[in-house]
Amino acid sequence: MKQRVIVGMSGGVDSSVSALLLKQQGYDVTGVFMKNWEEKDENGECTATADYQDVRDVCDAIGIPYYTVNFSREYWDRVFSYFLAEYRRGRTPNPDVLCNKEIKFKAFLDFAMGAGADKIATGHFCTLRRDFKGRPLLCKGTDPNKDQSYFLSLLSQSQLENVLFPVGNMTKAQVRQIARQAGLVTGDKKDSTGVCFIGERRFKQFLMQFLPAQPGDMCLKDGTVVGRHDGLMFYTLGQRRGLGLGGAGESWFVIDKDLENNRLIVSRGEDPSLFTTALMAENPSWVAGEPPCGQFSCMAKVRYRQADQPCRVTVLSDGRLLAQFDAPLRAVTPGQILVLYDGDVCLGGATIASPAADPAVLGQNR
């Protein structure tokens, strides 16, 4: 009997081609569109409606069945509530990483397995291989400009056990070419941007629907007030645009947030405090299996598309990670994800807690 694969289809070209390739390879393929956000955008439009129509057109063209499932409640409880809580803390979360962990590879995976699937598939640009024990290893996609292993770094091995990434060994250009040759409506559709499943929004206005803005002072490090901010949640470390500070000379940058006094700390020019050679990260997840013991060397990213950076990681007694880098990193941002690599193998990830290591902790764990 053919293996049954349920493909998570977003209405984009990557998942469209994934379904097409699996059908051509002889699998019993079903497309599933996940609707995870009920709200319309500021123009009164629901992008999910257009995306679902694209899924229908693609599935009809391929000749596979399709349907939709609604995980809106799971998305709100597991992803969006966390997203808001992190902004309340003055941090800058990465909802795409949590969305993969809690929705695409949890709610959707559980649904698909319950519906009789042998495997699920997505359009992520990642690859999988097995270690000497037969365990799945998450690896980078072939296209370095589209590799999405960063966004899957918080998954567990069990979540990868029955997963296929059909386009992981392709470039984006190859994927689009296949879609065009097959006459799929998504062949020239632009890549989605914005918050996972919510889409492109005027971010400030969108966030204000859920969190009250608390304007305050923009200050230099010495306390000199130089302007007003609209709410600390709207700014991130290293930000240059949108500060509303003019004048001749170097550009202004956000260098810190004073949550206690609701002050945004800024500097004219890139202040040295924007750069650090160490960070603390919490709640690690080891997608490659067991956490390494003690101290180890690897490569790391602290944001998507950043070049891999050599670092030394110490697993502290409380489970947190101390990462020390050979070269200073700019604007390491609490709430973002530290992702660790051994070559092209993703070891795991953790949430950045602070851009500089606590000297006391560092001294205690040497």
Image (spheres, rainbow, N blue to C red):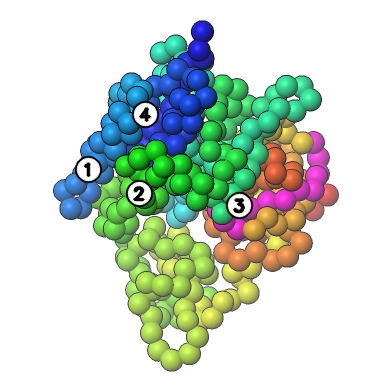
Contact? badges 2 and 4 (CB < 8 Å) = no
Find disc 4 in the rendering and name its residue.
62
**Cα–Cα span, label 1 and label 2:** 17 Å
Find disc 1 in the rendering and name its residue.
46
Between residues 271 and 195, which one lies in front from this camera angle? 195
Picture residue at 49% right of the left edge, 31% below the top: 21
Mark 2 vs mark 3: which is more N-terminal? Answer: 3
Residue ranking furthest to the top: 1
Q: How many marks?
A: 4
Q: Is residue 73 left or right of residue 287?
A: left
Q: Is residue 185 left or right of residue 355?
A: left
Q: Amino acid at mark 4?
A: Ile
Give SS at disc 4: helix
Residue 285 placement (x, y as % from top left): 62, 35
- Graded by Cα atoms within 10 Å as few (under 14), some (14 to 19) or many (20 or more), the crowding at tag 2 reads few
Picture residue at 68% right of the left edge, 55% below the top: 308
Q: Amino acid at mark 1?
A: Cys
Mark 1 vs mark 2: which is more N-terminal? Answer: 1
Find disc 3 in the rendering and name its residue.
144
Mark 1 vs mark 3: which is more N-terminal? Answer: 1
Mark 4 vs mark 3: which is more N-terminal? Answer: 4
Q: Which residues are magenta?
A: 293-306
Q: Is residue 303 magenta?
A: yes
Q: Residue 53: which quarter of the image?
A: top left
